[in-house]
Amino acid sequence: MTTLSTNNEAVNAPRVSRARTLWTACTAHALHDGYTDLIYLLLPIWQAEFAIGYGALAFLRALAAASMAGLQVPTGRVAELIGGRTTLALGTALAAIGYVIAGTSTELIGLCVALVVVGCGLSTQHPIASAAVSRAYQGDARGPLGTYNFAGDIGKAAIPSGASLLLALMTWHHMLWALAALGLIVAVGVAIFLPANLRPVHRSAKPEQHASSAGGGFALLLAIGILDSSVRMGFLTFLPFLLKEQGASLSTIGQALALVFIGGAAGKFACGWLGARFGVLATVLLTEAGTAAAISAVLVLPLAPTLVLLPILGVMLNGTSSVLYGTVPELASAGRTEQAFAIFYTGTIGAGATAPILFGILGDQIGAHGALLATAVTAAVILPLAIALVKRI
């Protein structure tokens, strides 16, 4: 009787905390991803105010991305010492404080400091929140992880779009302070609602199977993730400038980014379904070939058709990541799901930090159009890697 009672408590406890864990993680993901992509809306503003080139703008974007990427694994270690809930709450508050600093900045050095602080705060979300969802749902985590990933795209659409509307009412400084207040509210919510203790993730597959997959399959998965992130970040860095050349206003640029992110959110669902029905290979081939074709198209289209195409491009641009994130637990070594997520996010976010610099330097040499064409070529490079990956799964 005692054993049965204990087993029932073990089953019921996660069920009680599952919904709360998922929705708290989703809220944090939406805010953090919205904070991350808010920078794209700010780049043209900072270019005009501080008179800087594409390379310098890409460096600004890279400061936040590099600090976020570099602290993914250390964040996991901090969470082991003080708890994931505390770490995520403090990180969310730190990201908000970074935007407070940015809002007070009148010189370029102030923005650099602010973006490093923002990146440090943002580093806490992905490994902790995704691991929390995995722990809450155990072997049934693929679907909830898809919902969690979808929430990030909602934030990418809502926060830059909302910021563009606020810019019609106030200066960019005051807009950042308003969004920083939102971040502090979410930090309090994380501290209150995210469960403090969740069971470790247990996998049913044999350890030797995981070790074999992690040795080859995970390395290929990581390589595809790095290139995919490079394409996405490079494209988003130059999209505002392409739209500006086409005659788009600042408000239109904000709405255009929202269209891309809304399409990306839809891509998370669509490509999850496609991946389950047609497999990883077919889905990745479709999304990456579609990304290369769509980026090439926006380079030659006028503004109105470009705006129509952007949601479709968003589906392709983010579709691959939906398949990749769901495959991480399958290729992780036994009992090392959190570490696998940390390594994967370190690689993909690190690529997001360095790729815009490389594309930015290229843009200074051959222009925004040439840099965007280079992102399309990079998307095409992923195709043979996807063929190699499917043999390892």
Image: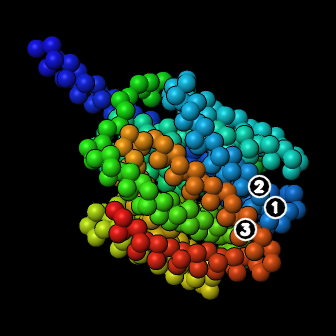
Amino acid at dot 2: Leu
Residue 24's tag is none
- 218 or 39, nearer to the observer: 218
* Number of dots carrying numbers: 3
Quadrant including the C terminus: bottom left
The secondary structure type at the circle numbered 3 is helix
The answer to whether the residues at label 1 and label 2 have Cβ atoms under 8 Å apart is yes
Of badges 3 and 2, the one in the foreground is 3
Q: Which residue is mark 1?
A: 56
The Cα atoms of the two marked residues, 1 and 2, are separated by 6 Å
Mark with earlier residue (3, 2)? 2
Left-right relation of 207 to 223:
left
* Residue 376 image offset from top left, x and y in percent: 58, 78
Amino acid at dot 1: Ala
Amino acid at dot 3: Leu
The secondary structure type at the circle numbered 2 is helix
Label 3 crowd bin: few (<14), some (14–19), many (20+), radius 10 Å? some
The residue lying at 48 percent from left, 47 percent from top is 341
Residue 358's tag is 3
The residue lying at 50 percent from left, 37 percent from top is 128
In this rendering, is residue 41 above or below 77? below
Q: Which residue is mark 2?
A: 60
The residue lying at 64 percent from left, 80 percent from top is 373
The secondary structure type at the circle numbered 1 is helix
The answer to whether the residues at label 3 and label 2 have Cβ atoms under 8 Å apart is no
The Cα atoms of the two marked residues, 3 and 2, are separated by 13 Å
